[in-house]
Image (spheres, grey):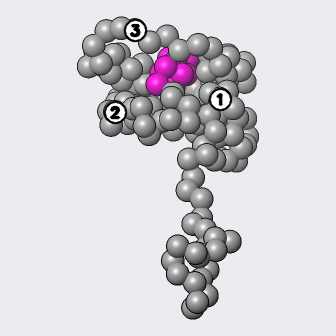
Amino acid sequence: MVPINKQSHLRPLATINQVNKCISILKSKPKIKRSMWSRRAQEYEAKICSGKIYDLAEVVRDLNKGDDIMIDQSYSERQLFEKAYERILTEFQIILGLSIQDAQKKLDKALKRNLEIQTPKPAQKIEATPNEGLEEAAIK
């Protein structure tokens, strides 16, 4: 059961058909209105709290920035995206019977996100012999 609002009203988990429709929503082109951000943020928040899985998928789709998520989004936009993303991710995980990582891969694939690019790579070692200056250090 998934909470619909702050009361104790619950809806049953989505069906596999609803999950497939959500995936097609996530793959579709974002529909971003040209209204003020504060108004859109209220609408996104209402959709997240509505408990409707299709509305949740629309919010994730519309706020998804792909690989540039941290660069192009404001703090409030990121917060809304992460809230909606986590909710849909956990529901996908339960319904599809996947691990959290596999569910995330499926969700990210639908969103055309590649989060591996965002993980920092280990720093390269700089090895220098006592005779070499810093400018001549060999990077290995």
Dot 3 surroundings within 10 Å: few (below 14), some, or many (20 or more)? few
Is 108 situated left or right of 67 in this image? right
Q: Residue at x 65, y 19 (%)?
A: 27
Q: Amino acid at mark 1?
A: Lys
Q: Earlier in the sequence, mark 3 or mark 1?
A: 3
Q: In this orientation, which residue lies closer to the viewer: 128 or 1?
A: 128
Dot 2 surroundings within 10 Å: few (below 14), some, or many (20 or more)? few
Residue 10: x, y in percent?
A: 48, 27
Q: Earlier in the sequence, mark 2 or mark 1?
A: 2
List the residue tagged with mark 2: 74
User: Quarter of the image containing the N terminus?
Assistant: top right
Residue 24: x, y in percent?
A: 68, 16
The answer to whether 92 is drawn above or below residue 57 in the figure is below
Please report the bounds of the magenta region as a residue range: 51-63
Secondary structure that dominates the magenta span? helix
The answer to whether 9 is drawn above or below residue 139 in the figure is above
